[in-house]
Amino acid sequence: MGGDMRGTSVLVTGGAGFIGSHLVDRLLAEGCRVRVLDALLPQVHPQGPPTYLSSEAELRVGDVRDGDAVRAALQGVDVVVHLAAAVGVGQSMYEVMHYTSINVQGTATLLEVIVKGRLSVRRLLVASSMSIYGEGLYACAQCGPQSPGPRPSSQLALQEWEMRCPRCRAPMQSRPTPEDKPLIPTSIYAINKRDQEEMVLTVGRSLGIPAVALRFFNVYGDRQALSNPYTGVAAIFSAALLSGRRPLVFEDGRQCRDFIHVSDVAEACLAAVRKEEVADVAINVGTGRPTPLLEVLAALQQEIARGGEPEILGRFREGDIRACYADIGRARDRLGFEPRVAVGEGLRNLARWVKAQSPVNRSAEALAELRRFGLVR
């Protein structure tokens, strides 16, 4: 592959989805032959195959847990980019079997077909997630760098949201999170993504297939499933504003995330496909910049100009964290990756796309489900 990817056959599982479809476009532009395997789950694709998926890609509708469908999709494939997954921190905490089946069993099926079929796959990528870190890296003025676990229940009950040093209890400052930070997943989804990552890297290592896990941070942009209340927070806010509702915000809205535009994520994936020498490694894909949720919401309100003021719930959702943003040094060094889209520009682009859509706002319904299962406190 290297610089010239023309004629390379690539299978993208989950390729009809938000990130996958953007990657499909980039691969086709590079001259690749692209096949997509996607289950077209109704929660993500309520109207069936999306119109934005390029007709130049071969779409096969099938479940990644179906060995026969996977075996057929893998025939003649050089590169596999495994994006197929059930996505959502909150929902994963009560749809445990569903998430674990799609994410872990699906990955196991894909790998087993490759192993037993002795297929000539030359490169393997898997979508991992920043959620596997749990809280990001922090620094205490007195005790130095810290990799804390979840905030204590007693602290959350007092609505004291900021992270405190696990040693001296002083307030801490968030720092860029490197790949070698200890993994402390706080949701079933995060545990699934950690398992997917380790499974793919382990099998790649054992078979001599160069494998890379890309740890996506908070991806946003056009083609997000706006009617899915468990998608990214920028899309959830957008759907609420467009429907004239008050966006729901957990805690105090000052929690920080690393928002990276989907076009930059597609470029990182493309770089990881190209760089054959990069193998057996996990790499952060983010911007390296933290953004508070209320800033994201304010930017979207300014562009969409609908909906009411946010409803600050002052409640904690199980599985959530306070802050995590990427150290992207490894992505720069190993992939030559540099994010190009600033958050302000990206949110303006998202808002323009959102205003042409007709989403159904289901955030209140999702909140009711979380409360029913005791996952909001």
Image: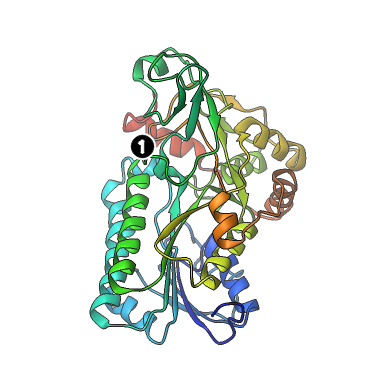
Q: Nearer the viewer, residue 38 or 144?
A: 144
Kindly indicate the quadrant of the structure image that contains residue 124: bottom left
Q: Nearer the viewer, residue 360 or 252?
A: 252
Q: Could you tell me residue 140's position as x and y percent?
A: 49, 21
Q: How many marks?
A: 1
10 Å neighbourhood of mark 1: few (<14), some, or many (≥20)?
Answer: many
Residue 145 visible to an observer of this rendering: yes
Q: Could you tell me residue 149's position as x and y percent?
A: 37, 29
Name the quarter where the C terminus is drawn: top left
Q: Could you tell me residue 144's position as x and y percent?
A: 47, 24
Q: Is residue 288 above or below residue 151?
A: below
Residue 246 visible to an observer of this rendering: no
Residue 208 falls left or right of residue 83: left
Residue at which label 1 appears: 186
Which secondary structure lies at badge 1? loop
Name the quarter where the N terminus is drawn: bottom right
Instruction: Please report the residue visible at 61 percent of the width from the left and 83 percent of the height from the top.
Output: 31
Q: Could you tell me residue 364's position as x and y percent?
A: 49, 35
Amino acid on which disc 1 is placed: Thr
Kindly indicate the quadrant of the structure image that contains residue 93: top left
Instruction: Please report the residue visible at 35 percent of the width from the left and 50 percent of the height from the top.
Output: 194
The colour style of the image is rainbow
Q: Is residue 366 above or below residue 339?
A: above
Q: Is residue 267 above or below residue 342?
A: below
Q: Nearer the viewer, residue 104 or 181?
A: 181
